[in-house]
Image (cartoon, rainbow, N blue to C red):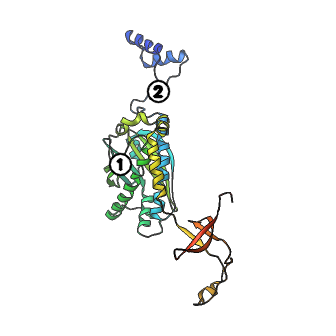
Amino acid sequence: MGDILSQDEIDALLRAMASGGGGVEEDAALAKKAGKKVINYDFSRPSKFNKEQLRTLEILFDNYARLTSSFLTGYLRTVVTIEVLNAEQLTYNDFAASIANPAILGIVDFQPFKGSILLDMTAEIGYAIIDRILGGPGFSLKKTRDFTEIETILMERILTQMMNGMIEPWAPITPLQPKVSRIETNAQFAQIIAPSEMIALVTLSIKVGGVEGYLNFCFPHFVIEPIVSKLNTRYRFAYLDDEDNSEYQAKLEENLEKTFVPVSVAVGRTSITVSDFVNLQVGDVLLLDSYYTSDMDVMVGDLLKFKAKPGLSKHKNAIQITSVIREAD
């Protein structure tokens, strides 16, 4: 956003126009003499996003990175970490020139807005994801090659799930229905806007197992122009205080209460040698580290949460909670 001119500056411009002016150089010299700082403005690269709007995009993608890394970690069954690096504005031509070949380029219909955004994923990450999906260890290829048709279909499904992760973080700004329309592996076939158009580029680092790469989200200005004014922290926090948010919180709590968690009870523990283990026979007795009167450990996931006594309830094995293990304990 440009600086707002004062009334004195507007009057000076009108006087200069009425007198024919002295040219840009003379006006700059007069401004410098008056002690004012002259800022060059590049009309070929107009500023369409201010710092607060870019910062809000970083905040939105912080939440997106958390949700997407959790999804990919569970889906690929390997550790996936995603972090936001920065958000900046530049021309689409500058962004397209930085795209490697090949790459995973997802053309996304940014519904309900008109136009598309672009998701750029480095090829190394794409190879690692495909390797994990097909049962491999998640290694990238030593020598890059183009993606096969089957690999492209697999990546389209992954990107579709990744784009669904944008719905929740963007809810404070606008309801989204992003849809991956197609996948390209060459930047020449992913020209979604004119080269001179300004975009907001959000760059994230991603690590799949031991393979590192980048995710780039390209937002053309004209696509998100209807909501650019809402890209500010004041609007975001105002949404959090809105009464309608209580309904969202109630729904979230309801879903959490229906979530299943694994609960197990450890009767006791012991250690034996490998030799004893391979020679175990029916009827052998193992001595545990607990007595029949001892409280048993109740595990929720991998955490010790309760102590309990064994018993029967309606002719079924059961336990009775005797104490609760707090975090401080």
User: Looking at the image, which is closer to me, 295 or 269?
Assistant: 295
Q: Residue at x 37, y 47 (%)?
A: 118
Mark 2 — residue? 40
| Residue 102 visible in rendering | no
Q: Residue at x 65, y 58 (%)?
A: 327
Dot 1 or dot 2: first in sequence order is: 2
Mark 1 packing: few (<14 Cα in 10 Å), some, or many (20+)?
A: many
User: Looking at the image, which is closer to me, 321 or 84?
Assistant: 321
Q: CA distance from mark 1 to mark 2?
A: 38 Å
Q: Residue at x 64, y 84 (%)?
A: 286
Locate residue 310 relative to residue 314 in the image: left or right. Answer: right
Mark 1 — residue? 178
Q: Kindly identify which numbered label has been placed on residue 156.
A: none
The x, y position of residue 254, in whole percent, is 46, 53
| Residue 203 drawn above or below residue 239 | below
Q: How many marks?
A: 2
Name the element at disc 1: strand
User: Looking at the image, which is closer to me, 34 or 106?
Assistant: 106
Name the element at disc 2: loop
The x, y position of residue 98, in whole percent, is 42, 47
Q: Quadrant of the N terminus?
A: top left
The x, y position of residue 287, in whole percent, is 67, 83
Image quadrant in which you'd find residue 124: bottom left
* Amino acid type indicated by mark 1: Pro
